[in-house]
Image (tube, rainbow, N blue to C red):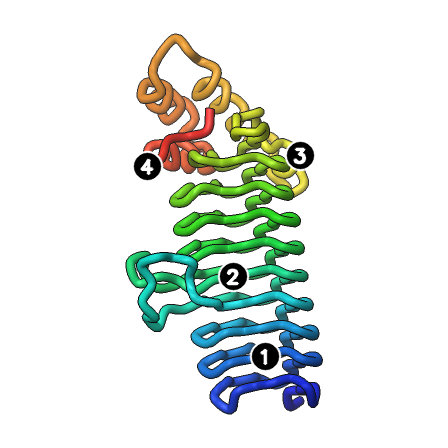
Amino acid sequence: MAPRIHPTAIVSPGAELADGVEVGPFSVIEDKVVIGEGTFIDSHVTIKSHTTVGRSNKILSYASIGAEPQDLTYRGEETELIIGDENSIHEFVTFHRGSAKGGGVTRVGSRGMFMAYVHIAHDCQVGDQVVMANGATLSGHVIVEDWASISGMSPIHQFVRIGTHSYVGAMCGVTKDVPPYCLVAGYRAELHGLNSVGLKRRGFGSETMAGLKQAYRTLFRNSGTTMVNNLVEVEQSLGQVPEVQYLVDFIRSTQRGICR
């Protein structure tokens, strides 16, 4: 089925729209945009040049996708925004292209939900199945791993990593890395245990849950020794659990430090 484009929409001849794409009233799609099969674009959406959108996405009114990075060093380089499949991108969301100094590409994975007023800045790398609630904001160069959830009005500092299956509470300023499988909350993000509800909903088994709970106690509640020693202890006793080993590796590789 050929693309359906409302008469009031403006679509550049240099844009590539796959079969089944629908473009609503007063939307603007610039040159060098690629949009995958079955994507729905509501009214008053702007999609800027050098943006690739996968299949079966839903982009709602007043979203601005692929604008140039808000970076003082940007000099008009042809950087990119690449979005995966089956995302729900809500009203007034803004995704920006990468910057030359940050690798040139902002990436958003598949099957995510990005609620109203979410912002993803230049050079961010966002995984699959990510949920960002209203007004959540990523500064530049942030990494958000698969299945992470970021609650409303929570700003994430530049270069922070949000670990897989983690949960960031509402109005929570995050300036350090959030460990995978964990929950942070508070005005300045502090650890509040495992993301137990989320992990159970996603089918994590009893052995994995027990291993993560023991690892959490050793890593974050054992104040009698150093984190280096705690990591060694956890790896030796629980390293056979893949999720525990990933948690250990994540902490060891941190550049900004871990929320505590």
**Measured along the vertical axis of the image, is residue 121 above or below residue 256?**
below
Q: Residue furthest front?
A: 72
* Numbered circle sitting on residue 255: 4
> Distance of mark 2 from mark 1, alpha carbons?
15 Å
Q: 196 or 162, which lies in front?
A: 162
Q: Looking at the image, is mark 2 or mark 3 earlier in the sequence?
A: 2
> Distance of mark 4 from mark 1, alpha carbons?
40 Å
Which residue is tagged 3? 197
Report if the CB atoms under discs 1 and 3 are less than 8 Å apart: no
* Numbered circle sitting on residue 28: 1
**Measured along the vertical axis of the image, is residue 103 above or below residue 186?**
below
Say which quarter of the image contains residue 210: top right
> Distance of mark 1 from mark 3, alpha carbons?
41 Å
> Distance of mark 3 from mark 4, alpha carbons?
28 Å
Residue drawn at the location 65% of the way across and 49% of the way down: 134
Q: Residue furthest top?
A: 224
78 horizontally vs 134: left or right: left
Q: Looking at the image, is mark 2 or mark 1 earlier in the sequence?
A: 1
Crowding near the residue tagged with mark 2, few <14, some 14–19, many ≥20 C-alpha atoms within 10 Å: many
Image coords of residue 245 (percent x, y): 41, 34
Number of the front mark, 1 or 3: 1
> Distance of mark 4 from mark 2, alpha carbons?
25 Å
Report if the CB atoms under discs 2 and 3 are less than 8 Å apart: no
Number of the front mark, 4 or 2: 2
Image coords of residue 117 (percent x, y): 63, 55
> Distance of mark 2 from mark 3, alpha carbons?
29 Å
Image coords of residue 4 (percent x, y): 68, 87
Residue drawn at the location 66% of the way across and 55% of the way down: 116
Report if the CB atoms under discs 4 and 2 are less than 8 Å apart: no
Which residue is tagged 2? 95
